[in-house]
Structures are given as C-alpha cells and as structure tokens.
Amino acid sequence: MYNKVFICGVDTSKLPVLKEREKEELLKEVKNGSKTAREKLINGNLRLVLSVIQRFTARGENLDDLFQVGCIGLIKSIDNFDVTQNVKFSTYAVPMIIGEIRRYLRDNNPIRVSRSIKDTAYKAMQVKERLIAEKQTEPTVEEIAKELQIPAAEVVIALESIVSPMSLYDPVYSDGGDTIYVLDQVGDNNDDNNWLAEISFREQIKNLSEREKNILTLRFMQGKTQMEVSEEIGISQAQVSRLEKGALERIKS
C-alpha cells in the first residue's frame, strides 16, 4: 500500500506541484469566481492530500477511500481560505484535510457511538492538537477537560469510543519470525470450570523440561501473560513465546 502508484485512477507520480506564488494567484482567481483556477488549485495540491493520508495508513483503511475524503477536505479549504490573512495555504489546508479524514474514520467506526460522544471526542482532539502546538508537549486529560469545561471522565470515554477495535490476532511484536499477538498477552484468572482439562494438561507436561513446565504452568494454570512470565523467570517475552510454542507442539504430537 505504501508504494501504490495509482489511487482512485490517478497516477500519483505525475501529479503537478504548484509553487507558492502560483497558489496565491490561483486563490485570488478562485475568490473572483474562476472555476478553471479552482480546478488547477485542486489538481496542484493532490500531493498534499497524499502526504496527509500517509499518517493514517497504519489503520488498515483503504487508501482510495482516504484519498477521496482528503480531497473533500482540500476542496473545503480552498473554498474557505481567506486570501487576506498572512498564512500559507498548506498551513491552513493540512488541518482541514486531517479533520475531514478523522470525521470519516469516526463516523465509519464499526462500533456505533452516540453523536454527542463523537462530537465530544472531536472537540477533545481539536483541543489536544492546539495545546500540543502551543506547548510542544502532550496535554493531560485534565488539561483537555479544563479547556472543554467537562469532567475528565467524559473526555476519556469520548476518546476511547472512537478508537478502532483490536483483534486478538493483531501482532504486537516480532523477533526473528517469532510473532507475539494480542492473544498471547491476555491472561485469565477467572475460569474455574476447566478442571478436567487441567488434569489432562498436567499429565501431558510431565516429559517437558523444568523451564517449559514452569512457563506452561504460569501461563495456563495461573493465567499469567507472557510479559508477566518473562519478568518472573528472567527471560525475554520473545523467548517465553518461543519456548511456549515449542512445548505445546510437543504436547500435541
């Protein structure tokens, strides 16, 4: 996806690039009602849209969709840009494009969230971006809540509500081919109904090494995560994952 050349049928390698003076002249013509200048300005800033959507590629969204949404943000920024202000067009357009993409991602989240919570999340993100720009540091939830004049708990709920759900099979770490998934980091201390399986399991691990027995006992008897096991026995999480998988393969065979 990162090296894709054609997006929405557009050959991105051949997109034109406008100089700052050309943008200024075209923006003035747009304000005078020139549709031709508007078209040139849109085409001349498509690379700007491409640069912005790269920030969102890690989410697994379709690049064609993001590009189209980003173009809507670009068009809005062209139509609303004030040529009398001493501001570069790109400085104004980038936040507009980002905002349009975030609204799209927020509204297309697979988990349905109420409009009021979404609006709070959107306002919180705007405040967060402004505070980062002003202070050059990440603001706390309390600082964002103070700006919005709402409880900090509401900010947390709102921001959490627009985060895309994570699969248990999403990779979180990889070391030489030994991938660790979210599932590997989930513990369970509350399952008291599998005692028959536990008896069978204890019988199967008798032929394993002491370290392997210890790892499987901690993982499946005590419900600890691989990270907790690695800290307890003093080896890396990747080693725990490797030993655990090898032991389970021998048990299965």
Image: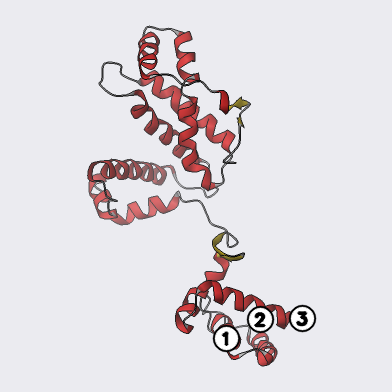
Position in image of residue 205 (x %, y %)? 66, 89
Residue shown at 57%/86% (left/top)? 217
Q: Are marks 3 and 2 in contact (CB under 8 Å)?
A: no
Q: Secondary structure at mark 2?
A: helix
Residue 26 placed where, x, y %? Answer: 40, 12
252 in relation to 167, above or below: below
Q: Which residue is mark 1?
A: 217
Q: Amino acid at mark 2?
A: Ala
Mark 1 neighbour class, 10 Å CA radius: few under 14, some 14 to 19, many 20 or more: some
Using the image, determine if residue 191 lies above or below residue 17: below
Disc 3 from disc 2: Cα separation: 10 Å
Where is residue 106? Give x, y as percent: 47, 42
Q: Secondary structure at mark 3?
A: loop
Mark earlier in primary sequence (3, 1)? 1
User: Mark 1–mark 2 contact, CB under 8 Å?
Assistant: no
Q: Pointer 2: what residue?
A: 247
Residue that mark 3 sits on: 253
Picture coordinates of residue 177, whole percent (x, y):
62, 64
The mark nearer the N terminus, 1 or 2, is 1
Residue 186 visible, this angle: no
Q: Residue at x 39, y 31 (%)?
A: 94
Q: Residues within 10 Å of mark 2 (few under 14, many from 20)?
A: some
* Residue 72 placement, left or right of 119: right
Q: How many marks?
A: 3
Residue located farthest toward the right when viewing the structure as drawn: 253
Q: Amino acid at mark 1?
A: Thr
Judging depth in this view, the residue of 70 and 137 nearest the camera is 137
Point out the tag, 3 or 2, that comes first from the N-terminus: 2
